[in-house]
Image: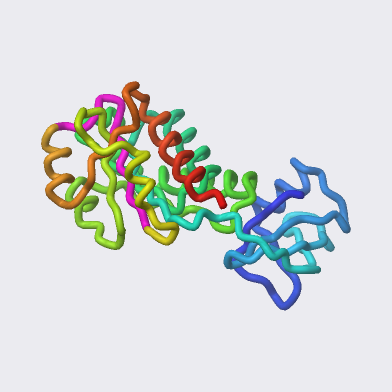
Amino acid sequence: MQRYFCEKSISDKVILSKEDSYHITKVMRMNLDDLIEIVIDKNTYISKIVKLGNSVEALILDEIDENNELDTQVTLVQSIVKEQKMDYILQKSCELGVFKIIPYKAGRSVVNFSGKENKKTMRWQTILKEASEQSKRNIIPEITQPMSLSEIVNLQEYDIKILCTIEENTKTLKKVLSNLSRSDKMLIVVGPEGGFTEEETRTMVSNGFVTVSLGKSVLRTETASLFILSAIRYHNMR
């Protein structure tokens, strides 16, 4: 059953957005009385389509008692990479349960879209919405405006802050996760294709980040992000 996110309902009726209405009528080619899932404020409802057109309307029938979110809230600080790879990371990290994504203007990031941050962020938010619907999430992960190093190190609301590295003599991901509580809030920083500069590593470590190894292999940035989220998802399984 197709899932859509809505901001609010009018009594027991939902009016879907223009984009979702187009998807229902033109892409999915649904009919009157077809059932869809509607998520409003993290709650999921079985709904019946009662009006088609530019503004599709659906009647709420019943609430679904489910929670498809990870217990551990994971914020991914992803160094900005080229568009195709960035899109892939956003889509797959959403499927794996990321709670929030912060694009990071790393020292060795090769992409520069100064002046186009708002346009990029809106596009990224659309990717996350579609991935959330496809993977049956209860929320759409938030994506912020790109941040600088000084902004990243001043983020305080986390129980553990991880800096992924290929340096030897660092903690392994397995060891870190073995001490992880389900209710912990994690901040994970993944570098660009060229890795972190010495200054970036030194600054983050001096501000409470723990350097963590993902194994002996050198992983591409898109692989590293998804590897660590997959490991956390596995650790959260009951």
Instruction: Tell me residue 127's x, y (percent).
Output: 53, 43
Look at 50% across and 45% down and name the residue there.
Answer: 233
Scheme by which the image is coloured: rainbow
The front one of 57 and 184 is: 184
- The reply to whether residue 127 is in sight is no
Instruction: Tell me residue 235's x, y (percent).
Output: 47, 46
In the shown orientation, is residue 6 left or right of residue 148?
right
The front one of 113 and 134 is: 134
- The reply to whether residue 95 is in sight is yes
* Residue 196 falls inside the magenta stretch: yes
Instruction: Tell me residue 83's x, y (percent).
Output: 42, 31
Residue 95 appears in which quarter of the rendering? Answer: top right
Q: Is residue 76 above or below residue 5?
A: above
Instruction: Tell me residue 78's x, y (percent).
Output: 35, 40
Report the magenta residues as a range: 185-197
Residue 221 appears in which quarter of the rendering? Answer: top left
Look at 25% across and 57% down and name the residue there.
Answer: 155
